[in-house]
Image (tube, coloured by chain):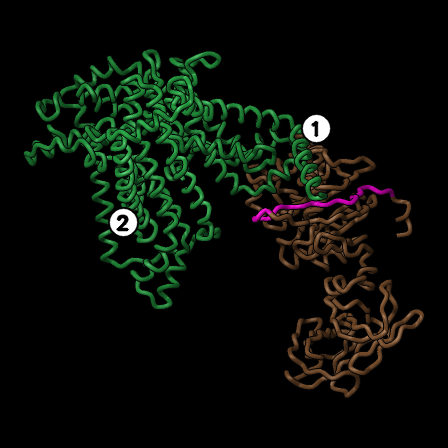
Chain colours: A brown, B green
Amino acid sequence: MSQKSTKKDYLVVKNVSKIFKDGRGSEVKAVNNISLTIKEGDFVTLLGPSGCGKTTTLRMIAGFELQNGGDIIHDGKVINTVPSFDRNMPMVFQSYALFPHLTIFENIAYGLKIRKFSKEVIKNDVAMVSQMVNLVGLENRYPGELSGGQQQRVALARALVLKPEIILFDEPLSNLDAKLRIQTRTEIKRVQQMLGITALYVTHDQSEALSMSDQIVIMNRGEIAQVGSPEEIYNNPNSSFVADFIGNANFIDATVSEIGSDSITVSVQGNSVMVKKTDETFSEGEEVSLAIKPEAVDVSLEPTGFTGKLDVSSFLGSITEYKIEFENSFITAVHSNTTGYTMKHFKMGEEVHINFNKEFFHIYKKQ
Amino acid sequence: MEGSSNQLSRKEGKFYQLTRDPVLFITVLLILGLLLLFIVYPLYAAAKLSLTPEGHFSFKEYSYIFTHSGYTKTILNSVTLGVVVATLATFVGFIFAFALTKAGIKGKKYFQTMGILPIISPPFMFALSVILLFGRNGLITAKLLNLDTGGIYGLKGLIIVQVITMYPIAYMTLMGILQGIDPDLETCAMNLGAKRGHSFWTVTFPLALPGIFASWLLVFVGSLTDFGNPIIIGGEFDVLSVKAYMEFTGMGNLPRGAALAILLLIPTVFVFFIQKYIMKNKAYVTITGKSSRRASSSVGKVTKHALFLFCLLVSLFVILFYVTIIGGSFVKLWGVNWTPTLKWFAYSFDVGFKTLKNTVYLALISTPITALLGMVIAYIVVRKSFPGKGALDFLSMLSYAIPGTAVGIGYVLAFNKAPFKLSGTAFILIAVYVFRNVPIGVQGGIAALKQISSDIEESSTNLGANTIYTFRKITLPLIRPSFFAGATFAFVRAMTAISAIIFLVSARWNHLTVLILAQTEIMRLGAASVLSFALIIVVMGFVFLIMKLTGLKQSQIFGTTN
């Protein structure tokens, strides 16, 4: 992490916008004037809900879409009009996009053949990469004969074999089942670190982003909402959108009662709560939102804290999730079933008491 | 302000990218040039002549046509015929398609063949058969029923032959539509308490209605532009296509012939694009998932038997026509002297062998060109983005809608003098085949390409392949089936062409259909039968060969009509 400052800027996206025409001919800003710097060797994730512009951004970098304004700078050179086949940024597609009429060997060798490598080199490189992603023995099969996980590894091998400096990933794991997804993401991260490749990874899955990235870029409605390391983003979301998207935070209405030097006191249902000050400025008497993650909410029958009504409890194995009616809305609380807590049984509609771990409150402008 | 400058830079950007991909750039320019030269320019030449009959601009020809009953009657005839034929053919086509997709009648495979067989027949083979069966010396009318029916010439006979020729168009269109209706919908209607008939009228029929309308329009256009049948069996019943030919070639009144062709062209193009629009908007009916669901019992037993009987009768009728042609080849003088003979074969060999050879030769040359051009156009239209793309798409589809008569007249006018002096050459015939049939390849290619996810081509580009490498190594192998389908259909259409090429054939480069027409006109029906028989053999042989070599099915080859 400390080396980070010495890494050079590998890929820079500068004031880039993309406008699409919708069916009726009116313009939609898919990407709105975003800027972004990717350091050499970093694993960077573009994370956001569908339609936030993350895939469009990736496709502009790959050269499949031409931006309406701004520059894409690769290794110090503006590459705006470089055709995609000259960019040398292999991509792993969501659909894998394997060539159905070519064998696995031919699929992996495809890019090498275009680059006119000799037969021996191609054979060696394909063999090496097949080994690396565990595809040995499948070289003569066709993509249709492989399982989803194997197809995914072929897509990865096809990109790796070119020994690229950067690999682009467009939601590569979304077609795999849950268990395989977790396995594969570790695998991708391992290979990326082993080879020291820069990676730009698009996903809408927050656990994927948190577990793989050096940097996460959260996007919303064509704009960048926050950039930071997984820890920064998880612990200090800079907006209620990020808090909601990355931590499934609960939002509670509150009123600012006092503004201190580095803290703000707000009142919730007549109770005072002190929260850390942020970059946003608030005034006394302002209606605000407090965000708190489900794991910082405790539910009990002890008559302390706030009062709510249990709506549903869901046993999810290692954790139990409680949905509680509170202040005309709902709050989610999560309890670990393994560390310390024993599972609590509440009846539906039962009056329960809620205690917030106040250190984890974040204050945001009311939306 | 900002928006407009943005748009400008986007256009420039697109154009810039186009110049960065020189292969694409040159291909686009070349194709646009060819389409303009061989599709737009001839039409322009015909329109220009019709509007400048005496060297200066005037509507004289058009006002003459609309004020003289001889011509207004022709227009009325064409429309009447079109309406009747479109209605009947759509009915027959619907019954066929419904019986095969929803009713699960017996002999499905056989009926599927019967549904499209007439497509691969010479243009006026059915007219010839009708004359042999129902004409003055017809087997059925004169011999069996002892009637004197010169009356088969005209509207009656035309309706019979056009319905038989064109119900496959309706069948193919409706087949696609009906297959797209999820059987679960009908099952569900019944599950909710609808009786079978009720479920048909409340679910199946309304969902098929856009397709029914589209197929009606397609057949209407087909009837309007048909030339082969009316010239043989039309008799006194003049239609526009024949009238235009008579004026242009017979009377040498070039401006009026051109004006009639333009009058034929306008409604045709209009109707064709309405039809396209309807078919494009039927998307809500189609189901993209696997259609493994069974259409179990959407019709009752009685209905099923009735449908079977109907299909059987139509099929037998069609087969009777083929048998008649074969029979006609082997008798001395149909209706008068039934002595078996091979003299027509000998005679036909003398007058027709060279023509048959040339016809096949030119069809074989034009076929791969047509198919390849169609694929290339489909590829750049579906996958590439460049200025002028809309025009390219429109032009390549347009030529399907232009009546052959207008094409023929346009080519004569456009290519009879420098710089494009082509009349009398083989090249002009090849050009007609290629540009008349290229929409088949384009449509098939577009359909095939839309099934290949664009990810696959993008990933090839992403791995470093340029446009031409990607097309050669990835796209082409994947669309190969539809390439061969398009090629086969193009061959069939080139072999059975008449309406355009009748203006363009020469003593050196004649076409078999024109020869058959000539033999029919001089009442050598035996020779006409033999030559038709030969044409059918060649066409069916070719289709069969392709099917064997490529593993394609009939429906894949001829499904490209819609």
- Badge 2 element: loop
Q: Pick out the residue farthest to the left.
A: B146
The residue type indicated by label 1 comes to Phe
Query: For residue B258, what is the image quadrant?
Result: top left
Magenta span covers which residues? Answer: A8-25
The residue drawn where x is 23% and y is 53% is B305
* Horizontal relation, residue B531 to residue B258: left or right: left
Question: To which chain does the residue with label 1 belong?
Answer: A
Which is more foreground, mark 1 or mark 2? 2
Q: Is residue A74 above or below residue B283?
A: above
In whole angstroms, how far apart are the C-alphas of marks 1 and 2? 58 Å
In this rendering, does residue B125 appear at all?
A: no
- Residue nearest the viewer, comparing B432 with A93: B432
Q: Amino acid at mark 2?
A: Lys
> Residue B106 — which label?
2
Q: Is residue B401 found left or right of A125 in the rendered image?
A: left
Magenta stretch holds residue B138: no
Q: Can you see residue A269?
A: yes
Is A15 within the magenta? yes
For residue A237, above or below residue B362: below
Marker disc for residue B243: none
Residue A117, numbered circle: 1
| Chain letter of the residue carrying label 2 | B
Q: Chief secondary structure of the magenta span?
A: strand
Secondary structure at badge 1 equals loop
| Residue A342 in the image, given as x and y percentages of width and height | 74, 79
**Residue located farthest toward the bottom when viewing the structure as drawn:** A303
Task: Reply above or below: B519 against A73.
Answer: above
Residue A283 locus on image (x, y percent)? 85, 70
Q: Position of residue B150 (x, y in %)?
A: 12, 30
Q: Nearer the viewer, residue A8 or A283?
A: A283
